[in-house]
Image (cartoon, rainbow, N blue to C red):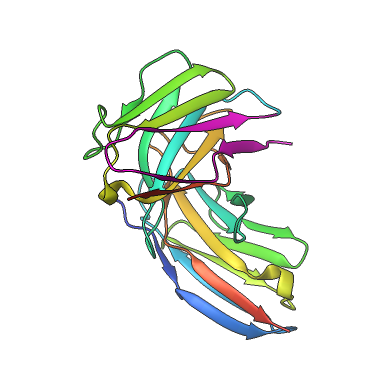
Amino acid sequence: GAVVSQHPSWVICKSGTSVKIECRSLDFQATTMFWYRQFPKQSLMLMATSNEGSKATYEQGVEKDKFLINHASLTLSTLTVTSAHPEDSSFYICSASTSGMADTQYFGPGTRLTVL
Amino acid sequence: ILNVEQSPQSLHVQEGDSTNFTCSFPSSNFYALHWYRWETAKSPEALFVMTLNGDEKKKGRISATLNTKEGYSYLYIKGSQPEDSATYLCAFGSGNTPLVFGKGTRLSVIA
């Protein structure tokens, strides 16, 4: 149980294009979903927290107009990287929780984004 | 800024060896400490959630201890096997704020 899928697993795009990443909880309803970014040899850095039907809460330094998060249902959240640039190339990973902020999160497998 | 430190950064052990690594976290505003195992090309998998000082949890050959007063947790693997090769992440939770992750310890078990 508690399976989270994430698509695509990797994507290569041209600078200036937008990329959408989907995160789905397959066998449970997620109260909260989280989006992280990881640079090489660094820890998972939280970008934003989203609750179904409400606006996402972005961490300091994360541009909300660049990283659009939509949490349309209790099983789906999407992250859209708008007008991607090479510096946005990174590993993006989502997680989902059935309860509070500090409780167990169930992770997707991540998306490797490369912007040319 | 909350700091969660894991050591060592990486570790190579022989099959059958026992090993352990450390997670250090703030000793104030503690709510929970999580351990995850992250195998390459897979999703991080929750191993343990620890909430009480002195907690000790076990899952097969893997166990973890918690000291909230001094702000550290140890993860032990007894008789390491090649399938234990993964990155082990710890994450600190203070209740109302999101989890803060360490950089992980990358374990390689050589057959």
Q: Quadrant of residue B36?
A: bottom right
Looking at the image, which residue is at 58% across and 83% down? B12
Looking at the image, which residue is at 41% across and 51% down? A44
Front one among A72 and B46:
A72
| Residue A65 falls left or right of residue B102 | left
A111 in magenta: no
Front one among B76 and A15:
A15
Residue A53 sits above or below residue B110 on the image: above
Front one among A7 and B9:
A7
Report the magenta residues as a range: A1-26
Picture coordinates of residue B89, whole percent (x, y): 51, 59
Q: Quadrant of residue B80?
A: bottom right
A14 in magenta: yes
Residue A8 sits above or below residue B74 on the image: above
Picture coordinates of residue A74, whole percent (x, y): 57, 19
Picture coordinates of residue B39, whole percent (x, y): 62, 60
Q: Can you see residue B10?
A: yes
| Residue A62 falls left or right of residue B19 | left
The number of numbered discs placed on residues in the rendered structure image is 0
Residue B14 sits above or below residue A50 on the image: below
Looking at the image, which residue is at 63% across and 84% down? B13
